[in-house]
Amino acid sequence: MTTLTPVLTARWDQSDAFTLRNYEKADGYKALRRALQRTPADIVQIVQDSGLRGRGGAGFPTGMKWSFIPAQDPASPKPVYLVVNADESEPGTCKDIPLMMADPHVLVEGVIITAYAIGAKHAFIYVRGEVLHVFRRVLNAVAEAYEAGYLGQNILGSGFDLDVVVHAGAGAYICGEETALLDSLEGRRGQPRLKPPFPAVAGLYASPTVINNVETIASVPSIVAGGAEWFRGMGNEKSPGYGIFSLSGHVTKPGQYEAPLGITLRELLDMAGGIRAGHELKFWTPGGSSTPMLTAEHIDVPLDFEGMAGVGSLLGTRALQIFDDTTCVVRATERWIEFYKHESCGKCTPCREGFWWMVQILERLEKGDGTEADLDKLLDMSDNIAGRSFCALADGGVAPVVSSIQHFRDEYIAHFEHGGCPFDPAASTLFAQELGAKA
Amino acid sequence: MTDVNDVNDVQAAPGPLGDTVRAEMAQIIARYPEPRSALLPMLHLVQSHQGYVTPEGIELCAEVLDITEAEVAAVATFYTMYKRRPVGDYHVGVCTNTLCAIMGGDAIWDDLSEYLGVGHDETTDDGKVSLERVECNAACDYAPVMMVNWEFMDNQTPQSARELVDRLRAGEQVTSTRGPRICTWKQAERVLAGFPDELATEGVAAGPASLVGLELAHENGWTAPEGGQRELGGSTK
């Protein structure tokens, strides 16, 4: 049996976990002292050896990403930038926000070590704007770190300088896409760039830039302190280490569960007290709405990068949204596509127009006015949206459509045979009894 | 009621943006290697002074950054947090993305919208409450979720939502379910411009759902293997 391995979440139950004083008491910033005694190349090597893969969804090897920063001509070096993607917005994803709220200093320490490793003297933490208190906590942690000499000039006497800016976004899911985030951070509309060039070559202000997710950067201090072998002692060969699994929806105890990669939904559901009483699992997303939905037949598949790819989905952000048998999958899908329609930046026609039309069709289907030809049309449109736009929003947006038709085609058909949605939305709510739900 | 995002009907600006605001904008610009990066926080600052992105605010941002007003307006209209009409003292968001909607967000929205007599992106006649359907706010383990001035109000019901807006409209002090006392929308926008207030240490470190895994690990004696940073110093509890 897999058990939980709290590392990132280990201090969250302390009332003042977010203060520098509390963080230092738990040996905070000790990994930084250790890192500053090694060469930057050593730190890159440790992270490469650990096998840490990006925790923002794509799972790209972190150390390799860092190693892509080209060597600078000493005569005219270009500045190198570190940007932390703290724009957590993927539906279902809710791990970075509590991390920054409870333990912002582990992120700041990770930022300093990472900046040192890649040769950055300027780092940015791009926090979505709609989480005011989280933004406050990160601002406060950075201010405390400056005061204590962990940031600024000649950090801990090492000769290394670093400035960190905490930057608030202004409400746009697309800014979680790394190149859109860079445009946004440059004061523009957040629209993705065509790659290549990749940010490692031409990122922020066309300079070499590393962009990493909050959880990725927050994992760096413990890897430096514990070592690559320690990290590899959790998870498995291709998906090493721990990660935060976020359970939400129709489970008895929704919340954050930090475990080795490769744990299964069955194990996590056992820990979370199972599906809410009297109901059964119907469908779930492994890592946010952009990862194709799965069903009860997949609850023993390892929640790691390979395991999820093997069943046609993605590990994504480990945002496990759980829906029970009261939930209408057509309604769920329609709402997700409304989201992608709303959040499409408008740059690429297939995405901008495609999701708009999909919403019309899904609304019709949910009302019972659709036909089977609509399902084929949705699949045909999916083929023409995914892979035909600059960024992954388009690919992610078709995931609920394609996977829901794959697993629940009969339920779509039942809508127009039944002349409407056969489900009672009140029965799905947490206050079903007060609403007098039928179920 | 007013529609806060009607671009064709921009109201006259409140008090002018004077030298103080220019000085604050200069402070924001000084944080960045290139001035234009300051634009998003500058627009938050405009909202903190004037209650929305005013034509005057757009002009000032353009002048200070030496870019065109069209470039500023293009940015201001891209992001949903920037408003083109005055926002109430309390911006109330109801998450109606899929998971929250299904867990009760749709029921809360329908009830609250009817109760307040306003729809999406509209403000009550007393200027107190602006209502908005918001997308996923990264608190899914606390569904159904509402936000007041971008502070978390977790695990809501139609009844608790009504009580919440009643208290806000009555001028009572409301506290986030796992955060600080709720300030006004303008004050919130000032913090988002990067000018901190004194509230960072208010509220808990983590809410109950954030801790369920950790508590289960404690109960069962589950830990990460020895060797990680957290094991070096032990717990401070």
Image (spheres, rainbow, N blue to C red):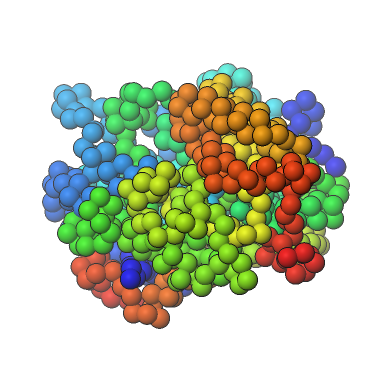
Residue B7, visible in the rendered structure? yes
Horizontally, is B50 left or right of A85 in the view? right
Residue B102, above or below A210? below
Question: Where the C terminus of chain B falls, by quadrant?
Answer: bottom left
Front residue (pair A112, B213): B213
Instruction: Say which quarter of the image contains residue A223.
Output: bottom left
Horizontally, is B64 left or right of B181 in the view? left
Label count reads 0
Which residue is at 66% across, 34% downward?
Answer: A372
Which residue is at 48% across, 33% downward?
Answer: A395
Residue A57, visible in the rendered structure? no
Which residue is at 31% across, 73% downward?
Answer: B223
Front residue (pair A250, B209): A250
Front residue (pair A20, A71): A71
- Percent from the top left, x then y, of residue A109? 31, 55
Residue B66, above or below B92? above
- Percent from the top left, x then y, of residue B39? 53, 32
- Percent from the top left, x then y, of residue B176? 62, 63
Instruction: Say which quarter of the image contains residue A354.
Output: top right
Question: Where the N terminus of chain B falls, by quadrant?
Answer: top right
Front residue (pair A68, A76): A68
Which residue is at 70% across, 46% downward?
Answer: A414
- Percent from the top left, x then y, of residue A151? 31, 50
Horizontally, is B190 left or right of A42 in the view? right
